[in-house]
């Protein structure tokens, strides 16, 4: 990334003025306003703001355990191609992780792969990752989960604004997480969100976010919790902790930046998509490379540009080409999750056959795709993609 924010200079000046004048920087009015406006943009009933996307994932799992929807030892499936903080909360919360393989051309779990996995390993929940802005056939996956009474959760941190089957990704499961880290579609420096249509889960997320207390609930919800636990006075309620939680609260700086960047997110997605179409046209003409398949998507909101080579030798060739041209490249997220040191240590029981994730691990990498790419940057990437 060249800049932390879109319109970085103006955003920094506005932020400096806000900090100078603000009489409160801890979580308050602007965070709440950002939650409301983000939920409206996303098309969800509720949004709960956190200090990071990783915190959002951990809080989501803790909230489901607090509500009794998940219990110690329950098996939770997850996308084999994912980020560490999608998997770690499953382990940290005493659940049993099972990796579900992905389709290399979509970068994501498809419905047929989920069906195969649940026949092998029944699961209580499935935490899917919508990787790099792409997505699987989430409408079919949602139906499979409903039929098998599996809680569907989405890590939508990399797919803000992608659409299929009449909805945005992040709206197919019981809840979904978002990240506003520097390199994502919109940045609040650090920050994350959980969206859900479930009011009970929304309330519990707010309790989990703030040490287990009720301060961020509406007054009538506070009365319910206090009556349930025989908290008789306002004084006693100040330090009454109702369930397990963390301190995952954001600051008003997060709220301010979120409101600022949300105004630009549609433009951000439009430019990313424009760039992707240029890159994709060249990839499809290169016999060394495998193009991605997003025909099932109504709208693609790319997080980055995946380069999938037909063999490991080709991968080395193109890695050298990108590096020589001064283009920063990265592995395709965690690749085969089974190769990660933490996973070998804590999930040695999982012997899933991850053919697709292994293929991407061995043959793929990605480079950035974001609105601040200049025309010269785009031309450089295009030159690296040609045969």
Image: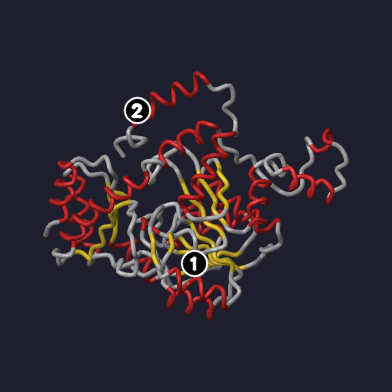
Instruction: Give the residue at the far top of this rendering.
Output: 20
Residue at x 60% of width, y 54% of height: 60
In this view, the mark in front (2 or 1):
2
Gap in angstroms between the C-alphas marked 2 and 1: 43 Å
Picture layout, residue 202 above or below residue 136:
above
Q: Is residue 89 left or right of residue 68?
A: left
Residue at x 21% of width, y 46% of height: 323
Q: For this rendering, which residue is in front, 351 or 127?
A: 127
Percent x, y of residue 58: 58, 51
Percent x, y of residue 41: 46, 50
Q: Is residue 195 left or right of residue 332?
A: right
Q: Which residue is mark 2?
A: 10
Q: Is any part of residue 348 visible from this angle? A: no
Picture layout, residue 349 above or below residue 364:
below
Q: For this rendering, which residue is in front, 53 or 49?
A: 49
Q: Which residue is mark 1?
A: 99
- Mark identifier at residue 153: none
Residue at x 43% of width, y 63% of height: 167
Secondary element at tag 2 = helix
Quarter of the rendering occupied by the N terminus: top left
Displayed quadrant of residue 180? top left
Secondary element at tag 1 = strand
At label 1, counting other C-alpha atoms closer than 10 Å, the crowd grade (few under 14, some 14-19, many 20 or more) is many
């Amino acid at each position: 990334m060249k800049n932390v924010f879109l319109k970085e200079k103006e955003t920094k000046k506005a932020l400096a003025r806000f900090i100078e004048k603000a009489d409160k920087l801890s979580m308050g009015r602007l965070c709440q306003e950002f939650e409301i406006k983000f939920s409206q943009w996303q098309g969800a009933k509720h949004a709960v703001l956190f200090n990071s996307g990783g915190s959002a994932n951990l809080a989501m799992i803790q909230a489901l355990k607090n509500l009794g929807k998940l219990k110690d030892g329950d098996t939770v499936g997850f996308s084999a191609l994912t980020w560490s903080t999608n998997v770690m909360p499953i382990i940290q919360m005493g659940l049993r992780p099972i990796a579900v393989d992905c389709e290399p051309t979509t970068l994501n779990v498809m419905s047929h792969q989920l069906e195969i996995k649940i026949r092998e390993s029944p699961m209580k929940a499935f935490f899917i990752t919508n990787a790099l802005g792409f997505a699987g056939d989430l409408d079919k996956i949602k139906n499979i989960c409903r039929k098998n009474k599996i809680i569907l959760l989405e890590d939508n941190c990399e797919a803000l604004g992608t659409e299929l089957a009449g909805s945005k990704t992040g709206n197919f499961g019981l809840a979904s997480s978002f990240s506003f880290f520097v390199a994502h579609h919109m940045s609040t420096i650090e920050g994350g969100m959980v969206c859900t249509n479930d009011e009970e889960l929304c309330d519990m997320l707010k309790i989990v976010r703030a040490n287990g207390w009720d301060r961020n609930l509406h007054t009538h919800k506070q009365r319910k919790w206090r009556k349930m636990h025989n908290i008789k006075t306002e004084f006693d309620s100040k330090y009454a902790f109702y369930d397990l939680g963390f301190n995952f609260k954001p600051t008003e700086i997060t709220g301010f930046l979120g409101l600022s960047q949300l105004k630009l997110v549609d433009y951000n997605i439009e430019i990313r998509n424009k760039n992707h179409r240029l890159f994709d046209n060249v990839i499809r003409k290169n016999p060394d490379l495998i193009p991605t398949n997003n025909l099932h998507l109504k709208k693609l909101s790319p997080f980055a540009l995946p380069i999938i080579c037909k063999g490991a030798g080709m991968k080395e060739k193109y890695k050298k080409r990108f590096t020589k041209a001064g283009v920063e490249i990265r592995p395709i997220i965690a690749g085969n999750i089974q190769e990660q040191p933490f996973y070998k240590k804590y999930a040695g029981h999982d012997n899933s056959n991850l053919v697709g994730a292994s293929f991407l691990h061995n043959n793929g990498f990605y480079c950035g795709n974001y609105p601040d790419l200049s025309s010269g940057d785009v031309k450089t990437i295009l030159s690296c993609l040609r045969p």
